[in-house]
Amino acid sequence: MESNFFSGSENLYKYLVSIGILMLTLTIYYPLKEKQGLEILKIELISELKTLEHSVTENENMAIILNNKVKQNKINDNVKSQYLTEIKKAQRENELNKIKIDGKIQEINTRNYYINYYNIIVWIFAPLGLFLVIYGFLKWRKSKLNDDVKSKIEKDL
């Protein structure tokens, strides 16, 4: 009776089982690891986005308050020009923050795309790996039983 790992008709099924186990392991480990990293970055981006949005609303409120002060005629020209300078500064800062917000939103959307992509990879390759493992084990067992019967017949002869 030959008991070499690489002999017999069951080799294909051994390879299917090995490939299935490898596929399951890689499908579960790598995409989930990457997905977790992307979700952590997404959380950080969302908090940065909220900070920028808060800064924008704060600047807009300050600009409104300063604009109301400028509209009052009781303020002298030096104070008016100072208020106008502060309003322009707040508007520039808001424009920059809005550009940053657009970038953060685009980055969040990209991260969502890759998170969905990794979900698809898991749902395609995990069942395929599981199928290969089960199919390979069943065929390997059947092949091994046939080889055992064949060996017994040869021994009896």
Image (cartoon, rainbow, N blue to C red):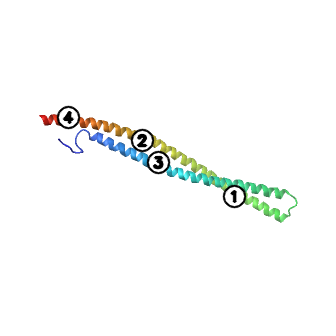
- Name which residue type carries label 1: Glu
Q: Which residue in the structure is indicated by mark 2?
A: 126
Residue designated by label 1 = 93
Q: Residue at x 33, y 44 (%)?
A: 18
Q: Amino acid at mark 4?
A: Val
Q: Are marks 3 and 2 in contact (CB under 8 Å)?
A: no
Q: CA distance from mark 4 to mark 3?
A: 44 Å
Of circles 4 and 1, the one toward us is 4
- The kind of residue tagged 3 is Leu
In the rendered image, residue 140, in percent from the top left (x then y), is placed at 28, 38
Q: Is residue 76 left or right of residue 99?
A: right
Residue type pointed to by label 2 = Ala
Q: Earlier in the sequence, mark 4 or mark 3?
A: 3
Percent across and percent down for residue 80 are 82, 62
Mark positioned earlier in the residue sequence (4 or 1)? 1
Which residue position is annotated with label 3? Answer: 32
Name the one closer to the observer, 42 or 110.
42
- Distance, label 2 to label 1, CA atoms, is 49 Å
Residue density around tag 3, few if under 14, some if 14–19, many if 20 or more, within 10 Å: some
Whichever of callouts 2 and 1 sits on the residue coming sooner in the sequence is 1
Q: Residues within 10 Å of mark 4 (few under 14, many from 20)?
A: few
Q: Residue at x 66, y 55 (%)?
A: 97
- The 10 Å Cα crowd at callout 1, few under 14, some 14 to 19, many 20 or more, is some
Q: Residues within 10 Å of mark 2 (few under 14, many from 20)?
A: many
Residue 141 against residue 103 in the figure, above or below = above
Q: Nearer the viewer, mark 4 or mark 3?
A: 4
Q: Which residue is mark 4?
A: 149
